[in-house]
Amino acid sequence: MSIVGENRIWQRFLYFYIPLGLFVAFLLMPFYWMFVVSLRPTADLLNRVRNPFLIYSVTLNHYRFLFEDTAFTTWMKNTLIVTVCATLLSLFCAILIGYALGRFQFRMGNFLGAAIFIAYLVPPTLLFIPLAQIISEYQLYNSYWALILTYPTFLIPFASWLLMGYFRTISAELEDAALVDGASRLQAMRQIVLPLAMPGVLSAGIFCFTLAWNEFLYALVFMGTAEMKTIPVGVVSDLIKADTFMWGPLMAAGILGSVPVAIAYSFFVDNYVSGLTAGATKG
């Protein structure tokens, strides 16, 4: 191998692989720490002599505590129901909004697109008080509908903006050809545009799923009883007692709570990346 080839290999290793490895290690460190703490006995967690990053003995008591002494399965069920329903509702609305703003030219279309994205930037802390009054007025408090109907207030804006940009990347000639062949606008959208826009739809769906799964404020305010808690609320309220933190069960809950999101990303990571880049550059 020539000297030039060796220099290129060392440069690639120095400027690409080492920074990438450090970034990956930094990114995965919190998950590794949660995994280690969730498997270590409580006595080891308080032992300052042993290396805190290593596992000397393994125990499943923290996971057993979650399933036997807390309502973790109920929290998981509540979170899954609310997240799936809110994601599907948000995607349905976002597809219609993104299609209308991305495919049609009409007065104030660009303004509406910008306004929708700006609405996403409104902090939830400014909205939960008026939303709480609406929930109380319609007697939805402490029900799944309280979260299913409020989560789209912050899910739809960004998903619509992302899909609007993705719809613009699809050639209009394909849709025009379907219209010439006798298809209606709805048929052309469903049979031509949506299949081509599936990477963007999956990206928006994963985004909505992640935000809804991790949401805390609305779930805390609108769910008043123990059997209606979601994972973020249940973990904080039942595993943190004043100044006492149950670190083992907390980290075990963090690991189990990350599994659905990790599965979603692992299955759709290619479509997620392509959908985000297309929607971000064409929106």
Image (cartoon, rainbow, N blue to C red):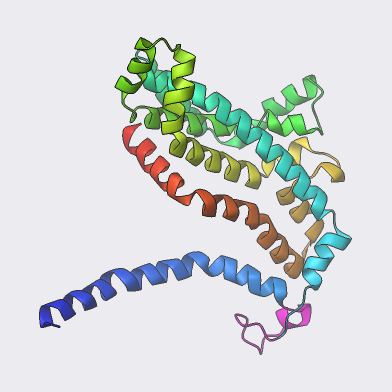
Left/right placement of residue 82 relative to residue 29 reads right
Most foreground residue, 148 or 272: 272
Q: Would you place residue 5 above or below residue 191 in this image?
A: below
Residue 8 shows in the view: yes
Viewer-side residue, 18 vs 126: 18
Image quadrant for the C terminus? top left
Q: Position of residue 33 (x, y in %)?
A: 60, 71
Q: Who's the residue at 24% across and 72% down the image?
A: 12
Q: Is residue 9 left or right of residue 254?
A: left
* Residue at (46, 35) in percent of width and height: 198
Query: Residue 160, percent across and down?
Result: 48, 29
Residue 264, placed above or below residue 86: below
* Viewer-closest of 99 and 71: 99
Q: Residue furthest front?
A: 181
Q: Left or right? Give the position of 175 relative to 133.
A: left
- Residue numbers of the magenta segment: 40-56
Q: How many marks?
A: 0
* Residue 233 in the image, given as x and y percentages of width and height: 74, 48
* Residue 241 in sight: no
Quadrant of res 145: top right
Q: Residue at x 43, y 12 (%)?
A: 183
Q: Main secondary structure of the magenta part?
A: loop
Q: Which residue lies most toward the right here? A: 69
**Does the stretch in magenta take in 152?**
no
Q: Is residue 198 above or below residue 210?
A: above
Quadrant showing the N terminus: bottom left
**Residue at (17, 80) in percent of width and height:** 6
